[in-house]
Image (cartoon, rainbow, N blue to C red):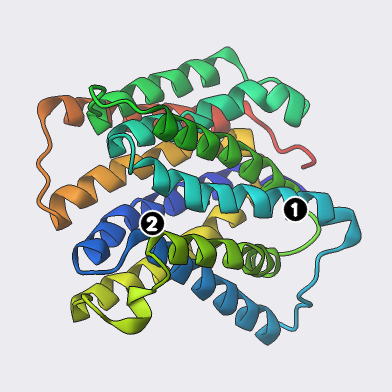
Amino acid sequence: MIERIGPGIACALAAAAVYGLIPSFSRAAFENGVPSFETTFFRTALIAVAFAILAILRNQKLSIPRVALPHFLALATATGIISICYLAAGQYIPVGLAAIIFFTFPVLILLTAPIAEGHAPGWKQIAVGLFAFVGLVLATAADFGRLDFRGIALAGAAAIACIVQFYSGHMISRHTTPVVFGSLVHFAILPATLAVAVWVNGGTMKMFTGIGVAPIGYVFLAGVGVVYVFAYFIHMTSLRLARASIVAPFYNLEPMVTVGAAALLLGERLNVTQYLGGGMVLSALIVSSLLDLHSRSPVPA
């Protein structure tokens, strides 16, 4: 398989932009009666079923080759940890701080690439990644006054799991398609997301009973599911086209979209510091894309 860096970067940017809409949709669903963990369960179930149907329509076998089983297990475990831990972190620490901890993963991927991918990103790529991370800190404007080890640990676990998700997603895509392994991964973690949702809500599921859920809450719930299906597909497609260390920096666009969507949909106002941070992140993405497109030649993936 030959890397296609340009299309890989394009898919990464598209995935990050679409992923960035999910927090605002999820928050809107929550404000209209749908608990956040139920939203996680719903989107997991939707993508598992939707991808399975698509695979069947494409005459693709819903199975994982034996050689790819270790990558599948790593991907399923990482996806489950991200789905549960990142959301749970926001219950103990400010959402902005959780985002800062979680989005250390692009820089960490660049630093671990020599071990995981057998090559060392240049110092320019690492410098751009660090510059983008500083911009992220400014853009999210996190409140560091309320710190809780549980929230920090949960967000950190999600960041580490995201590193595993990127590397394993790239490796498994050599053996099967995102539709096939995406469906099976989400079927694998579906029981865990259901158990967490039922446990957190005291043994009930509001999305099924309808108690306290406004009709518009179901609209936002559906929006989360549809957006997640599309985002995950192009996310894994980006890893199919290029290595994790190439596409990872472009996922810094996600929190920028989240902040902007929150301003438009939820009425949250941005300050000058946040605009400055967003500009730094966008500048870093542009520089990173130029470095990748002009200093790398296609190599066997």
Q: Name which of mark 1 and mark 2 comes first in the sequence.
A: 2
Q: Quadrant of residue 265?
A: bottom left
The kind of secondary structure element at disc 2 is helix
What residue is drawn where x is 76% and y is 75%? 62
Q: Nearer the viewer, residue 136 or 42?
A: 42
Mark 2 Cα-neighbour bin, 10 Å: few <14, some 14–19, many ≥20: many
What residue is drawn where x is 79% and y is 77%? 61
| CA distance for labels 1 and 2 | 26 Å
- Residue type, numbered disc 2: Val
Q: In the image, is 59 to the left or to the right of 46?
A: right
Mark 1 Cα-neighbour bin, 10 Å: few <14, some 14–19, many ≥20: some
Residue for badge 2: 18
Q: In the image, is 33 to the left or to the right of 153?
A: left
- Residue type, numbered disc 1: Leu
Residue for badge 1: 73
Q: In the image, is 93 to the left or to the right of 230?
A: left
- In this view, the residue farthest toward the right is 66
Residue 275 drawn above or below residue 59: above
What residue is drawn where x is 61% and y is 17%? 122
Q: Quadrant of residue 110?
A: top right
- In this view, the residue farthest toward the front is 202
Residue 21 in sight here: yes
| In front: label 1 or label 2 | 1
Q: Nearer the viewer, residue 57 or 160?
A: 160
Where residue 162 appears, as percent x and y from the top left, is: 57, 41
